[in-house]
Image (spheres, grey):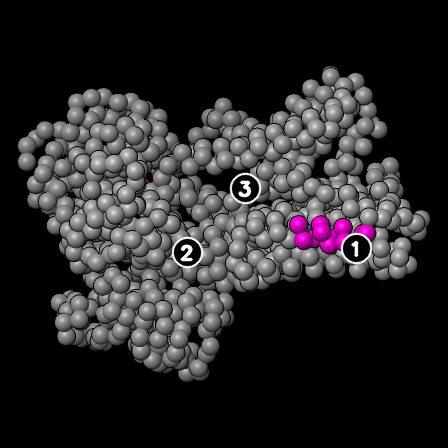
């Protein structure tokens, strides 16, 4: 690695109504380095990279790329300078095929006509690098979240990229895909590409980054060589105080069976049986495409089940729609917050109260006092950073949007809660809040199913883990036998 | 949180955003001022009363249309529903000799039924309402022509005259009805959980479904509301014209749609409010009225109205784009 600076940001400031998202930020990035960017939810990381990409106009400051100074950046200009961005949330066209998405807007060298064959062939090659089997002709809307993310990465990598910015690229991926991604990052690095890597998973930062910069409350804090720092120091820099990481202990042991599933089949899953007790946290592990989200959808009535039985508190129930599930006090936190979880244009408090808006209404009229109280409670409990509760959700940072989804599912006061990737994109501090909240829920007799691709979290929080592999149950592991390798093997179908 | 969430009260920025939000209202005021100078009798009490009565018919239907639009749908068959209802109501009272007290509730039921047809077709065929209602529009209108048999149906009881031609404290009855319908609409949209669900449906259908909203039932219900509201218009229009003709009500959805778009109801759903809608309606009323005062020929009036619709749509799209550009990537959270 030479010390040539390819990108430097000087005194960048950006205001939004009520928020100073970037406050005089200066950072520089060198050729061929993997530079991690850390900070709490709402620290301004995404805003900063959007400034580099020209996706937003900055109020003041200078962006220097390869020695040229730009005070105004546009998307096409940054593209032409070799900057590619994988945004925190997807930028794919759902109704186009994977190949078309990867080569969107790119002209063929051979012919003036668009050739589906040609781009499909090219797409296969790119996707092969990832070792994933995705048919390039599949429409993006038919892919899982993780597969979509792989398409996003493929799209960026297929270009002649000089500076690759990745905003939480690993959030929707599980361990094995993350490994693949790291391999690709290393290849790019060899070629001299600069990579800016944003993540809330600190272990990843230590795995692949050369340097790491920390931001807090819209300001630049410091830059360190990754080798010369440690986890605790980075957390302290991010949060601005000492923070102890731990998984809270539970005092009570689980009670009676709350939910039992017998030979559940449908939505791509086959013959799945398991049960969860009141006050128990059941972890659900598996690789991408193992059918975890599909299982959650089945249990919640969001997808039709073909055969099998669901018992709630020992009684068989029919769940044909989400409404049925809600009536049996089952709640779901969806993994796809933008597609299924949030009303992006609606106020934060409207989102949080939506599942119970009927319950807090008198003669159909919403009791706004109750609504405000509930929204305020969760805003404080899990620290949703927003200037006020009337802010449109679309204006929150990614992690804070995730907190709104979480608040929404908590406000519903379900007896059985299914969390699909609850802490995706959430910072270390807020994760602690959420773990404590989950523990408290379990102590109060709520049965929790937690799907997570974060192995540490799964091992730390669960009482028991079931592992899915290719749509079927691959095994069940008790707390005393928890072992990351064993679970991974089960998930890959080795045992 | 410290100075990051510091609120900065830049007066200019605030004023800017207030104006931005009220562009249609400003346009309305500018138009009024303009026409006051151009056409001397524009500002007379008599003319204003005519103007407001003119828009009241479309104004009532527009409230129903807005419910459908906020939920992400559209109803192009409003005018044709009125054509059919209008002829049927005339036949009920003249041919079948039903008293208004029976005929009117019946026609309200029929109108609600026409809406239900739209809604049920939408959810059963799973085709966009734009296409469904384009089709039913032709059907309803055709049915109106069939039962009308090219007659000019007359001879209603005198008691029926009040609805379209009467006054209460000097205010035309249709205007009063419009205000009541608008107020009820605003109440439902902003204060009730049902209103919340309409916005949610238009904002993110899948999220609404997962939150336990019965979206199919909602869609049918909203079309029924639209049909019901429009059948109120039917009654008022027939009473105003006092003759059953197939021409009454034709193309009414055009004004409703233009008003909605002018007033900030989004074509994509999830956004809209009654105040904006009424402002949009008034803009159309002022334009119509001024063109009549200036004795524009009919076709030039059509050209102007068409242009206004396009401007309204362009405005809707412009606002969307501006929002989108603020963060090309709100996508990027
Ligand atoms: N379009 C917008 N309108 C208003 N405020 C905004 C907008 N976009 C971002 N913000 C605010 O700017 C701040 C920084 O947001 P940003 O998305 O950069 O955070 P982040 O560091 O990427 O957080 P996360 O880890 O949650 O993704 C937040 O407080 C957010 O609410
Ligand atoms: Mg972000």
Is-magenta flag for residue B144? yes
Provide the residue designation for mark 1. B147
Residue at x-position 26% and y-position 63%:
A289
Near-viewer residue (A427 or B125):
B125
Residue B112 vs residue A387: left or right? Answer: right
- Label 3: how many residues lie within 10 Å, few (<14), some (14-19) or many (20+)? many
Provide the chain ID for the residue under circle 2.
Answer: A
Q: Is mark 1 within 8 Å of ligand 1?
A: no
Residue at x-position 70% and y-position 42%:
B252
* The quadrant where residue B19 appears: top right
Regarding mark 2 in the picture, which secondary structure is present there?
Answer: helix
Looking at the rendering, the stretch of residues picked out in magenta corresponds to: B138-149
Please state the horizontal and vertical placement of residue A192, each as a whole percent of the image: 10, 36
Provide the residue designation for mark 2. A340
Classify the position of the N terminus of chain A by image quarter: top left
Residue at x-position 31% and y-position 24%:
A72
Residue B333 visible in the current orientation: no
Please state the horizontal and vertical placement of residue B67, each as a whole percent of the image: 62, 49
Please state the horizontal and vertical placement of residue A241, each as a whole percent of the image: 24, 45
* The quadrant where residue A411 appears: bottom left
Question: Height in image: B92 above or below B2?
Answer: below
Classify the position of the C terminus of chain A by image quarter: bottom left
Provide the chain ID for the residue under circle 3.
Answer: B
Which one is closest to the eye, mark 1 or mark 3?
1
Regarding mark 1 in the picture, which secondary structure is present there?
Answer: helix
In the displayed orientation, state which residue is furthest to the top.
B37
Q: Are marks 1 and 3 on the same chain?
A: yes
Provide the residue designation for mark 3. B266
């Amino acid at each position: 690695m030479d010390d040539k600076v390819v990108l430097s940001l000087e005194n960048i400031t950006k205001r939004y109504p009520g928020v100073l998202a970037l406050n005089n930020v200066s950072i520089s990035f060198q050729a061929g380095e993997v530079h991690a960017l850390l900070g709490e939810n709402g620290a301004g990381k995404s805003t900063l990279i959007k400034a580099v990409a020209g996706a937003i106009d900055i109020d003041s400051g200078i962006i220097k790329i390869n020695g040229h100074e730009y005070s105004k950046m546009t998307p096409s200009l940054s593209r032409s300078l070799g900057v590619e961005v994988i945004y925190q949330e997807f930028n794919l066209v759902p109704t186009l095929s994977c190949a078309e998405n990867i080569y969107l807007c790119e002209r063929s060298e051979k012919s003036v006509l668009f050739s589906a064959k040609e781009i499909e062939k090219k797409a296969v090659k790119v996707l092969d690098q990832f070792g994933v089997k995705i048919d390039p002709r599949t429409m993006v809307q038919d892919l899982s979240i993780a597969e979509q993310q792989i398409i996003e990465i493929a799209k960026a990598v297929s270009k002649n990229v000089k500076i690759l910015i990745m905003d939480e690229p690993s959030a929707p991926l599980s361990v094995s895909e993350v490994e693949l991604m790291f391999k690709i990052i290393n290849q790019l690095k060899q070629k001299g590409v600069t990579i800016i890597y944003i993540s809330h998973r600190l272990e990843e930062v230590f795995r692949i980054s050369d340097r790491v910069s920390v931001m807090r409350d819209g300001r630049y804090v410091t830059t360190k060589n990754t080798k010369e720092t440690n986890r605790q120091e980075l957390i302290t820099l991010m949060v601005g105080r000492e923070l102890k990481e731990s998984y809270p202990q539970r005092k009570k042991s689980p009670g009676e069976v709350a939910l039992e599933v017998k030979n559940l089949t449908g939505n791509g899953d086959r013959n799945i049986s398991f049960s969860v007790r009141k006050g128990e946290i059941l972890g659900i592990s598996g690789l991408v495409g193992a059918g975890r989200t599909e299982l959650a959808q089945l249990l919640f009535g969001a997808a039709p089940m073909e055969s099998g039985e669901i018992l709630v508190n020992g009684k068989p129930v029919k769940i044909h729609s989400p409404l049925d599930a809600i009536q049996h006090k089952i709640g779901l936190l969806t993994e796809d917050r933008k597609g299924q979880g949030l009303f992006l244009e609606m106020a934060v408090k409207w989102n949080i109260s939506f599942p119970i808006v009927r319950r807090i209404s008198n003669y159909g009229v919403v009791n706004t006092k109750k609504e405000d109280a509930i929204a305020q409670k969760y805003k404080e409990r899990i620290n949703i950073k927003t200037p006020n509760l009337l802010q449109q959700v679309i204006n929150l940072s990614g992690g804070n949007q995730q907190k709104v989804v979480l608040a929404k599912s908590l406000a519903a006061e379900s007896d059985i809660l299914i969390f699909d990737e609850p802490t995706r994109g959430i910072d270390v501090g807020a994760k602690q809040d959420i773990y404590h909240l989950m523990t408290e829920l379990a102590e109060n007799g709520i049965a929790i199913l937690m799907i997570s691709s974060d192995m540490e979290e799964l091992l730390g929080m669960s009482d028991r883990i079931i592992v899915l592999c290719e749509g079927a149950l691959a095994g069940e592991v008790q707390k005393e036998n928890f072992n990351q390798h064993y679970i991974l093997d089960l998930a890959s179908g080795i045992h | 949180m410290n100075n990051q969430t510091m609120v900065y009260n830049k007066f200019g920025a605030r004023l800017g955003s207030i104006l931005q939000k009220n562009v249609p209202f400003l346009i309305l005021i500018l138009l009024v001022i303009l026409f006051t100078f151009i056409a001397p009798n524009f500002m007379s009490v008599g003319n204003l009363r005519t103007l407001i009565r003119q828009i009241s018919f479309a104004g009532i239907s527009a409230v129903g249309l807005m419910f459908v639009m906020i939920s992400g749908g559209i109803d192009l068959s409003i005018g044709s529903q009125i054509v059919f209802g209008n002829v049927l109501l005339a036949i009920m009272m003249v041919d079948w000799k039903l008293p208004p007290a029976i005929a009117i509730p019946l026609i309200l039921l029929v109108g609600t039924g026409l809406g239900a047809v739209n809604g049920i077709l939408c959810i059963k065929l799973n085709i966009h309402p734009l296409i469904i209602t384009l089709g039913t529009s032709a059907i309803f209108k055709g049915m109106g022509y069939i039962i009308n048999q090219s007659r000019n149906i007359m001879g209603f009881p005198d008691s029926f005259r009040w609805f379209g031609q009467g006054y209460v404290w000097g205010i035309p009855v249709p205007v009063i009805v419009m205000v009541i319908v608008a107020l009820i609409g605003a109440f439902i949209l902003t204060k009730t959980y049902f209103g919340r669900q309409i916005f949610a449906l238009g904002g993110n259908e899948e999220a609404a479904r997962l939150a336990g909203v019965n979206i199919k039932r909602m869609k049918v219900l909203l079309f029924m509301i639209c049909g019901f509201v429009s059948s109120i218009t039917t009654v008022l229009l027939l009473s105003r014209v006092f003759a059953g003709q197939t021409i009454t009500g034709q193309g009414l959805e055009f004004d409703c749609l233009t008003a909605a778009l002018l007033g900030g109801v989004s074509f994509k759903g999830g956004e809209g409010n009654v105040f904006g809608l009424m402002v949009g309606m008034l803009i159309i009323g002022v334009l119509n009225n001024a063109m009549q005062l200036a004795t524009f020929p009919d076709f030039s009036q059509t050209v102007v109205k068409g242009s206004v619709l396009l401007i309204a749509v362009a405005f809707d799209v412009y606002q969307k784009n501006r929002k989108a550009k603020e963060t090309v990537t709100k996508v990027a959270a």
